[in-house]
Structures are given as C-alpha cells and as structure tokens.
Image: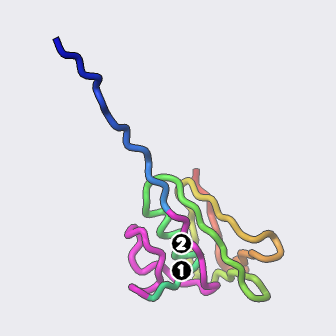
Amino acid sequence: MHSHAGCFSIPLPRRRRPFSVNNPSDLVDANPGNGVCETAPGNGVCTLRAAIQEANALAGADEIVLLSLPPPNAYVLTILAQLTITGSLTITGGGASTAIIDGNRACALTLES
C-alpha cells in the first residue's frame, strides 16, 4: 500500500503595485479598470483623478502614492464633477505640507463605505 501526501497550493492574493500620481493636473483615466493609470494610452501621465478612477474600477484594496511636486505642492481638482472613492483605498503622500489636495471650492471628494 502506497501512501502519498497530498500537495496543494493556495493562491495568495496578488498585491498590485500602487498607482503613482506623477502629474498635478485634474484629468480622467483613459481606460478605467485596465490596471494602468494613464490619461491617454501610452502617455504615462497619472493624475489623482485618474488614479482614483482606476482604483474604483478594480476589485480589492488599492494604494495611491502622491509623488513630490514642486511648490505649491497642490493637486488642484478643476473638473466640476464629484470625485468618489468607492472601495478600500490608501492615499500616501509626503505629508501635509508637500501633498495638498485642493477641491478648488467647486469639487467634492466623497468617501463611500
């Protein structure tokens, strides 16, 4: 009688790379849900709005990293549309003096649970 120990693998959730915001403009994502934060195909420009749209379109937890900007260090929301975060999202920046999200008195950032 032969006995074989059963081998199996448990797939672990793959951690996505964070979306790195590299442009302070307020532009939409070219293709939300494709896993790439870009305002146009192949341009490599990732804005805060585009990163949030991409994160909203993907299942699971996401992370957005706000890269250092030259002064005034602000990500100014200029599109007159509500920006809603619909899932688990961590936004990391260099601190209150180096990563400012400015609603421009016209835009709302809404967190939904």
**Magenta stretch, residue numbers:** 17-42
> In this picture, is 29 found above or below 4?
below
> In this picture, is 57 found above or below 6?
below
Spatial distance from mark 1 to mark 2, Cα to Cα?
Answer: 6 Å
Q: Residues within 10 Å of mark 2 (few under 14, many from 20)?
A: many
Q: Nearer the viewer, residue 109 or 5?
A: 5
Task: Name the residue carrying label 1.
Answer: 46
Residue 32 picture location, percent across and down = 41, 71
Q: Secondary structure at mark 1?
A: loop
What's the amino acid at mark 1?
Cys
Tag 1 near tag 2, CB within 8 Å = yes
Q: Secondary structure at mark 2?
A: helix
Taking the spot 56% from the left edge, 77% from the top edge, the residue there is 81
Taking the spot 39% from the left edge, 67% from the top edge, the residue there is 33
Taking the spot 64% from the left edge, 81% from the top edge, the residue there is 77
Taking the spot 65% from the left edge, 76% from the top edge, the residue there is 107
